[in-house]
Image (tube, helix red, strand yellow):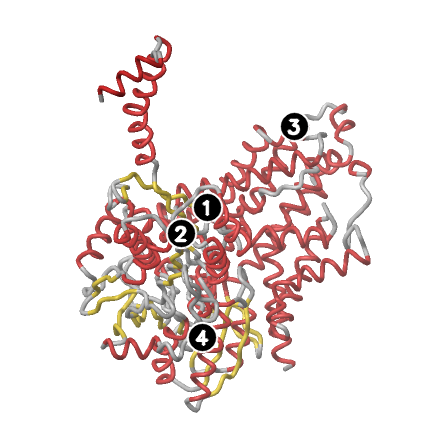
Amino acid sequence: MTDRKTTSAMTGLRIGRRGLLLGATSLAASRLGMPYIGNAAAAEPIKIGMIWAKTGSIVDQAEYLAQGGMLALEQRNNTLLGRPAEIVWLDEPNPQGAQQSAERLVGEQKVVGMVGGALSSFALAISSVAKKAKIPYVAANAATGDLTGKSCNKYTFRLQPPVDVHARILAPYCASIGKKWYLLTASYAFGQDIKRAFTDYITANGGTVVGADEVPVGTPDYSSFILKIRAAKPDVVIGGIAASDLTTFLKQWNELGMKGKIPFAEISVGNTDLWGVGPEAADGLYTITWWYKNPNNSPEEKAMAAAYEKKYNRPAADKAWMGWLGMKSLLDSIEMAKSTEPGAIVQALEGWKYRRGDLDIGYRDFDHQMTSRLLVAGIHPKITDKWDYFDVKAELPKTSEDLAKAFGSAGDSACKMDTL
Amino acid sequence: MLDMILSQAVNGLVLGFLYVLIAIGLSIIFGMLGIVNFAHGAFFAVGAYLAYALSREFGWWAALAAPLLTGIIGVIVEMTLIRHLYGKEPLLGLILTFALALLAEAVLRLVFGGAPVPFAAPKFLAGFVEYGPILITRYRMFVLVTTAAVLVAFWAFLAYTPYGRIIRAGSRDPEMVGLLGINLPIVFSGVFGIGCLLAGLGGLLAAPLWTITPSMAAGAIMPAFVIVTIGGLGSFLGAVVAGLLVGITTAMTIQFQPEWSGAAMYILMAAILLIRPRGLFGERWERFE
């Protein structure tokens, strides 16, 4: 030490006033400035992307899906990992629009995960972006089998049971009514899946399809289709038309005097589709994912339903629950991962579990499909409450073994899961 | 099969009348004012929502006021916004009415929510009648009769009343009519209001058949434009003939090629425009040349 001091003095090294000021400023910056920068990074909100339709035929369901998603974040006081969090909600007017919204969320908004895809075609488009950008994506509403089948990928998770599962549960009920079926399905992935699944079922069980029509999305008048159905005299009509299209069909089905004459059945309908029909025209046998009056709902779901009703002054529709649970699974997983790194969130989503009744539900490793029960519901013969339409007949499958069977095994799946 | 074709043809005619009612207001507004009203579907939706709100609050009969209220809203819109576009670049009218359509949808969503709202026809119009293979519901017959009555009344108004003559003359040569001392701005406000009233009436009559959502305008505006284009822009008779043609074509396509039913009216439009670019009854108007 003494040597060093001596050496300094000997070499004439001196710290001048300017040097001292510069050094002091640097020190101040390192001691005071850096913590400030660190705090700013910590306060930067974590962004979650949400893609639900703001326009088009599915917008009525999308409103509930979005409100459910926002409620999930509000229940956490809009924070994640101790930082503020926010949802960025973009539109999905069509599949191309959904894809562009997903690209904007990833590229411009730098979201850490996405929830959305109200229609199957939209969800498939978003899923392709999620795969390319390596961003976790929860498809909370789409039902096409491809999403967790041949188009599956490591970053896409799906909440809604696929068409085949719905069909396995509803088809036996329809077959018990009669074996001559007429299929009226939408001309896109969801409707085409329904047409295939129900045709396969009834032909394998000794029945026949007496007619099958594919209907363009947004058809305003179904009277000509209904006249064809009437002439074919089926035992049951299997529908595969979604959202406001279903509402329109049921109104005209009633108007043409078909309500109560030929049973109508459809899978995966939204509560709002029936609420919009009105008590006079509502009819049919359906599978639904959730019902706010189901006594078997978990305490957390009951709390969500109460919070929703308090905030929006109307009961939580099934779509509100789906939007809420889809978002909740993503937010829970970010907390579990203790990180916003996509790979860590994906792994957390694979391990995420949620208690419903006597079952722990979650996303399966091999195809990222959530396995949960469905409700089989008819319509009350007399509707006195404008929200209370459904008469729940069963909650199926009953056991976890039956549930696994209904959703199929890894061997049955068309999914070839890729890696992170 | 012949039974089925006959049944579908009659059904198509009834459907066509509903389309005519939606399209006729669009045709009138273009024919008289030279405005391509992209917001026409929005006035249709406003009519349906007003019918829903009035019937909920005061009973079904109150819904009959919905078209009148829609017409009044139309007059206000004309006096505050549309009026400034006469004689200007046609693109401005397209942009303004398109913006109006978006605004109306957003307002409806804000007030009534995005979910569909229920609306049923009155009980005395429930049920249907059958004549052999033909099935017609009472409500659709009511729509048909109402539409026919409105069309005849409006045609008589235009053809036989002094006001009708002023409107027709004003649509051809507004400057000359103005020089004769007639207050044309008031006439044009009235015409726009009548067009909107007809759209509102279409909304009221379609409400028990279609789904009432803020985006329902999309289902109305496209057939309306196709019908007006096929019939000839501004042609009253053209809109009627084209509406019926579209209805029958759609019904027949559903019978034989249902997956093409959504595209059928566009194919019909393309085919007719190839043969008659002005549409079936389109005329050469100096004002728009």
Q: Nearer the viewer, residue A232 or B65?
A: A232
Look at the numbered disc 1 and give the secondary structure of its residue. helix
Do labels 4 and 1 touch, CB within 8 Å?
no
Q: Callout 3: 10 Å neighbours few (<14), some, many (20+)? A: some
Q: Quadrant of the N terminus of chain B?
A: bottom right
Residue A105 tag number: 1
Residue under label 2: A114
Look at the numbered disc 3 and give the secondary structure of its residue. helix
Q: Which amino acid, mark 2?
A: Met
- Residue A354, given in percent of the width and then of the height, sits at 23, 61
Q: Callout 4: 10 Å neighbours few (<14), some, many (20+)? A: some
Relative to A276, is A387 on the left or the right?
left
Relative to B264, is A55 on the left or the right?
left
Q: Which amino acid, mark 4?
A: Ala
Residue under label 4: A414
Same chain for the residues at labels 4 and 3, yes or no? no
Residue at image position (45%, 77%) is: A237
Labels 4 and 1: the sequence-earlier one: 1
| Distance in Å between CA atoms under marks 2 and 3 | 53 Å
Residue B33 is drawn in which quadrant?
Answer: top right
Relative to B289, is B246 on the left or the right?
left
- Residue B67, given in percent of the width and then of the height, sits at 51, 44
Q: On screen, A361 above or below A104? A: below
